[in-house]
């Protein structure tokens, strides 16, 4: 079992719709969770991080964490074509300095 | 957000030569810096972790003598690809974690696209 799993996609959504990106992780001791956006040929950009159960909202983005289910998601409201990118989920374990990345989900927002 | 500057953004070198890539945290002190490489359409592969003033910790399968990492200060880490070969051509990205970061956010440099000819 991979430590951090994401569906590779592509996930296609129409412009204006809600895009839902999911990530599961295997280490129950994981402490912090991050979502990065990576455009083709560019380096990842931090969008959000979350560390406690529940929802965290920032503009059009909402991160959701469920530690019991070992599940973290990212919702993008009012999706725009400029949101088309690969979204990487990363997990930081307790007492560790290493980030474990998922393979990323490619999102396509169709105009 | 915190800024991490990576230089150069692109480099082409001849086979057998060495290339140095710099990673600087511009507005924060980075206790820990990470070096990744990424092949097309693949995810990030952690190569090594460096802490200021100490030797880098390399991931399994990464050659220490080929990929030299130096983290001489809290704002600068360098990766030197020695005796580069075409198979070393890749996208190299650094990231830095700020000192005292409560939740462990790490920020990425712009990446360096290395082509070995």
Image (spheres, rainbow, N blue to C red):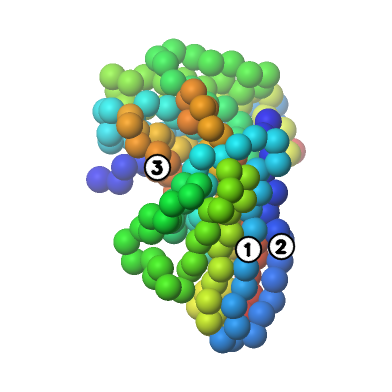
Q: Chain of mark 1?
A: B
Callout 2 touching callout 3 (CB < 8 Å): no
Callout 2 touching callout 1 (CB < 8 Å): yes
Please provide percent x and percent y for residue B47: 44, 58
Relative to the observer, which residue lies in front, B9 or A56? B9
- The mark found on residue B21 in the picture is 1
Find disc 3 in the rendering and name its residue.
A98
Quadrant of the image occupied by residue A100: top left
Relative to the observer, which residue lies in front, B101 or A41? B101
Please provide percent x and percent y for residue B106: 54, 37
Please provide percent x and percent y for residue A96: 35, 36
Front: mark 1 or 3: 1
Q: Taking B13 as reference, is B68 left or right?
A: left
- Circle 1 packing at 10 Å, graded few (<14), some (14-19), many (20+), is many
Q: Tell me if residue A8 can be seen.
A: no
Q: Chain of mark 3?
A: A
Callout 1 touching callout 3 (CB < 8 Å): no
For marks 2 and 1, give the CA distance.
6 Å
Find disc 2 in the rendering and name its residue.
B8
Q: Which residue is painted at 48% across and 68% down in the image?
A: B67
Q: Which residue is painted at 53% across and 53% down in the image?
A: B71
For marks 2 and 3, give the CA distance.
25 Å
């Amino acid at each position: 079992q991979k430590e951090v799993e994401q569906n590779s996609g592509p996930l296609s959504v129409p412009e204006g719709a809600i895009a839902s990106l999911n990530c599961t992780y295997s280490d129950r001791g994981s402490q912090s969770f991050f979502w990065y956006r990576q455009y083709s040929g560019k380096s990842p950009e931090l969008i959000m991080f979350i560390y406690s159960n529940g929802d965290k909202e920032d503009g059009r983005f909402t991160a959701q964490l469920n530690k019991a289910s070992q599940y973290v998601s990212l919702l993008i409201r009012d999706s725009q074509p400029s949101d088309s990118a690969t979204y990487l989920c990363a997990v930081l374990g307790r007492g560790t300095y290493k980030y474990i990345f998922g393979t990323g989900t490619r999102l396509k927002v169709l105009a | 957000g915190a800024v991490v500057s990576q230089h150069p953004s692109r480099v082409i070198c001849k086979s057998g030569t060495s290339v140095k890539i710099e990673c600087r945290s511009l507005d924060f002190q980075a206790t820990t810096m990470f070096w990744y490489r990424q092949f097309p359409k693949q995810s990030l592969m952690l190569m090594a972790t460096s802490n200021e003033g100490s030797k880098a910790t390399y991931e399994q399968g990464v050659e220490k003598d080929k990929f030299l990492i130096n983290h001489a200060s809290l704002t600068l880490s360098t990766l030197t690809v020695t005796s580069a070969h075409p198979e070393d051509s890749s996208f190299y990205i650094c990231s830095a974690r700020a000192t005292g970061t409560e939740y462990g956010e790490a920020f990425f440099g712009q990446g360096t696209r290395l082509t070995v000819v």
